Image: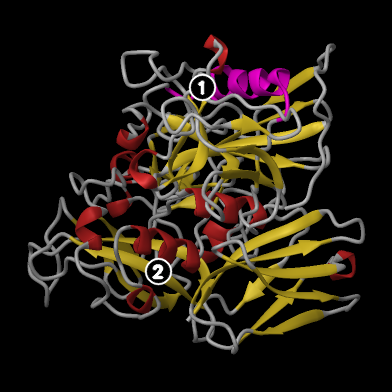
Amino acid sequence: MRRIKPLFTIVFLFIVMSSSYAQFNCGDILTDERDGKEYATVLIGEQCWMAENLNVGTMLTQNGSNHQTDNATIEKYCYNNNEAECDEYGGLYQWHEMMQYQTEESSQGICPDGWHLPSDVEFMQMEMHLGMSEEDANDTGAERGTDEGIQLQVDGGTGFDALFGGIWYQDLDFVYNEDFASPNPYGSDFYFTYFWSTTPGNYTDSYYYRNVCSRIDQMPTITRWEVDWNFGYSVRCIADVSNSYNFEYNGKNYEIFKELKTWEDAAADAVSKGGYLVEINDQNEQDAIYDAIINGAEIPTDYVTINNGGGIAYVWIGATDKTTEGTWLWDGNDDTEGTNFWTGQGANGSGNGQAIDDAYYNWGGTSQGTPNEPDNYGANQNAGAIALAGWPSGTTMLGVANEWNDIINTSELYYIIEYDETQSINYINKINFEIYPNPTSDFITINSENIEKIETIRLISITGAKTYQMNTNNIGSIQIDMNYLPAGIYFIALYDKNNKLIGNEKIIKN
């Protein structure tokens, strides 16, 4: 990664900080400003989910056939036409009412501002995080995975806390709620919860859903199937953006992601978002970043424990010597190229470390006059990170908070992305577009009303390697052949004529 940044100290600073997440941290209580109702939230992998079923709108008394309609009022069914059941289990919604009569994947629908309805792929991402294989995630039916359905239930360990609120089904009325007897053939001890996705199925006006069953001895998995739009199912919402905090310093945007990733995965995510893991070139920039970590993003100084780093917490930066041991580069996009700013080890290692061309460094011990790091402890510490406390834990023997340490790159930490141009960090879906099918086994198609704004398309592997690029001025739709690519997860990034990121999406290749 070839990049030149000024090495001189900036005397006058102007720092503007803002939060793309409105200072909401996943795990906080979400208050729906429309009606004041509150919902627990939970971080599962990279996704922030409601941990309770949505309960918004006016109860429509179900008489056996009347449907929710597009009448400018959000309508819901409550089990047995009892509002108290909605208070406990959330509302039951028909697909079109949930979508608010739109058809876009992952649209807001009836979710609060800043949240959206989950697509089939977003459910898959959660399922794979819980341990389901990619092959099983793409399958349909009840025999998918192992115990993922148990994990989603109360006391299942995820905090998703699925309750068995049942459904409304035109042929059976209200059924499968745990407070009432279940119909045959299942027997009275079978209860279910069903969740809509936004994704169309293979049949006309049918859509994918998920369900889990109370009988974990017989159905411990998560069912993926499709059903007609007129069923009344529960709804969960997902936060629109990652759990992140962004700020501006000296004309550049930075974003702190509170998601646990290895150094390589963090670099790949940075590339997919049009940036790179942060490069730090003077003390003022370092101090601004650390202030944003502690006071802006409000990251707890003990949010994780890294034993190979002295038993304290860190945040990834773009420094690495993974290509050549002892040759430290700013290589935040993990392409093996970058500015060499340091060589050798600190006093806790071989003691031959030195800066290259007076480049800035902030290794542990620097503030006391002698850099102790990097030391390549254990012979496999190849990535740089900012310490959030002194180390070893409880001491400042090797370094203090705000200084750097080299740690094992497979450790999982939060990370900081830097963007070259001042621009909105709300990069996701700057233009509305859809990609289908996703997952895919061969071709994908990109459709957008603003497709003329797309100048360049890049396909990036999860390791950060660019696997495909094309320039286009197409009107209509764009098709990309993915047959030659191995199975896995990829990022597709859309850029305008000024090479600014205007769209970003994850793709699963079967």
Q: What residue type is labelled 2?
A: Tyr
What residue is at 45 percent from the left and 35 percent from the top? 26
Cα distance, mark 2 to mark 1? 36 Å
Residue 452: name its quadrant: bottom right
Q: Is residue 261 magenta?
A: no
Q: Residue 298 carries which label?
A: 1
Residue interval drawn in magenta? 281-300
Q: In this view, does 174 lie to the left or right of 466?
A: left
Q: Where is 212 relative to 245, above or below?
A: below
Q: Name the residue under label 2.
A: 209
- Dot 1 falls on a residue whose secondary structure is loop
Q: Is residue 455 left or right of residue 279?
A: right
Q: In this view, does 453 lie to the left or right of 368?
A: right
Q: Where is 473 relative to 127, above or below?
A: below
Q: Nearer the viewer, residue 149 or 313?
A: 313
Q: Is residue 287 magenta?
A: yes
In this rendering, does residue 31 appear at all?
A: no
Q: Counting other residues with Cα less than 10 Å from the Cα at mark 1, is it few (<14), some (14-19), or many (20 or more)?
A: some
Q: Where is 218 relative to 47, above or below?
A: below
What residue is at 63 percent from the left and 50 percent from the top? 270
Q: Which amino acid does label 1 sit on?
A: Glu
Q: Which of 7 and 133 is in front in this view?
A: 7
Q: Nearer the viewer, residue 155 or 340?
A: 340
Secondary structure that dominates the magenta span: helix
What residue is at 44 percent from the left and 58 percent from the top? 93
